[in-house]
Image (cartoon, coloured by chain):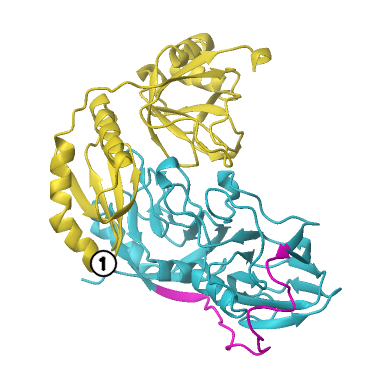
Amino acid sequence: MEWSAERYGPQAWLVRFGRDLSAETMARALAVARELEAGLPEGVREFTMGYATVLLELDGDEKAAARWGQRALPGLIEQWRALDLATTEARTVEIPVVYDGEDLAGVARQTGLAEEEVIARHSGRDYRVWLLGFAPGFPYLGVLDAALHLPRRETPRPRIAAGSVAIAGGQTGIYPSESAGGWHILGRTAATLFVPQAAKPFLLRPGDTVRFVAVEATDV
Amino acid sequence: MFEFLEVITPGCGATWQDAGRPGWKRFGVPPGGWMDAAAARASNRLLENPEDAVVIELALQGARFRVLADGWLAVAGASMGWPTGTARRVARGNELAFNRHQSGVYAYLAAPGGWIAPEILGSAAVSARSGLGRGLGKGDVISCRRDPMHPGWCPAEEGSPAATYPWVIEVRVWPGPQWSEFSEAARGTFFGTCWTVSSHIDRMGMRLTGATIPTPPATMPSEPVLPGSVQITGGGQPVVTMRDGPTVGGYPKMAWLDEEACRRVAQVPPGGTIKFLPPEE
């Protein structure tokens, strides 16, 4: 995979390091995020991760950003290419889920699996937090069992309750606050992913291991 | 702390806003903040407040307030049946009605010293969809930092002439990250169409109608999205991402609007039209 970089407006660069949702792309994303979390390169004021991209927003004007792209960015990319992708120690966070989501039956029908099998496959493996995005504290988790890959719902729901656990494509995630969304809802969790006033507002961080544990409604 | 107004109704929407909360995008937190920074800062300047003091952002029309104490207020931005671009004396017992939409979308209401509002992650900017605060509601009593009778200076009742916002605008764009993945024909449609602002506009995004743009065949994994991005949905409709929009998304981005272009676009009400001009070579 070739790394590439392009302008995103006059003051930002978007660096691309993959096209697919593979384990290797995830390892790269986590390694780059870890580097940037440890310290922003000079001239960079903020970074945002995508699955296979990182956005670097720069200080200064258009000219300074263009110059930075020519002088500093190639070296930075070289450094990132050389990063060790071996998995570093990750925290494991268990998320209790009541699997009674409104799309569970539909997912079972579309995948040809029994509902119990959908639940078993969803909760039967560990995921890693690939990135946070979309809404505060929303974790994009990889990688979902291939038997559960479905396109998004044709019509997004205007309202998805906080705590909803959902899937789309090769992804699974948890809605931290009520929002609209087009993912298939499998269940709900009582875990709080975003507490705005807390010293540590976000439950999950990129690189964390997440394990969904099926529980009965009375346990939540 | 000086109690100044009581909310009778927030109308189409009334929220605390300031310059927003940069630095949190990688946690999924949108930058937020005023939709029209120039108008918001102007409202603060009319009272000699710090430019970044908290203001109330009103959307479209309908908001009404009861005045609880004699004092000064300033309004800038959209015109909603109340003088805009000026500071005004108001008296206890008055009712302020922003109930006639005349031009623009977002108006800013400033009070002496700035309004007092709860801060989350370093900013008072409300982003209700993100679980960051809530809009003003009926019966809320709101307070400002200075004695309403004594703003930073002695304001004149006539300010600069009120801005009127056009219903038809042209804005220059920057190429978006997927610019080159759109076909020549797709770009031709994008720049050749006078886009109509639909009724689906809010602090997250503005949906435009007018034509269908052929989208690139490949689907892409979600990637970072900046406010001002013009995304083309699966159905081929442009959506302009605004201050509270998602931080990452999977729609291809044809173009990007800088802050000045973005605030002009934000002030075009439903039914108004926007023409995009190709990037400068």
Q: Secondary structure at mark 1?
A: helix
**x, y (%) of residue B147?**
73, 73
For the residue carrying disc 1, how many other residues have a C-alpha within 10 Å: few (<14), some (14-19), or many (20+)?
A: some
- Asked whether, in this view, residue B216 is left or right of residue B138, the answer is left
Q: Is residue B10 magenta?
A: no
Tint applied to chain B in the drawing: cyan
Quadrant the C terminus of chain A occupies: top right
Identify the hue of chain A: yellow
Q: Is residue B49 above or below residue B182?
A: below
Residue A176: image quadrant is top right
A46 relative to B168 in the view: left or right: left
The residue range painted magenta reads B143-170
Q: In the figure, B111 relative to A38: above or below?
A: below
Residue A145 position (above or below residue B16): above
Q: Amino acid at mark 1?
A: Glu
Where, by quadrant of the figure, is residue B7 drawn?
A: bottom right
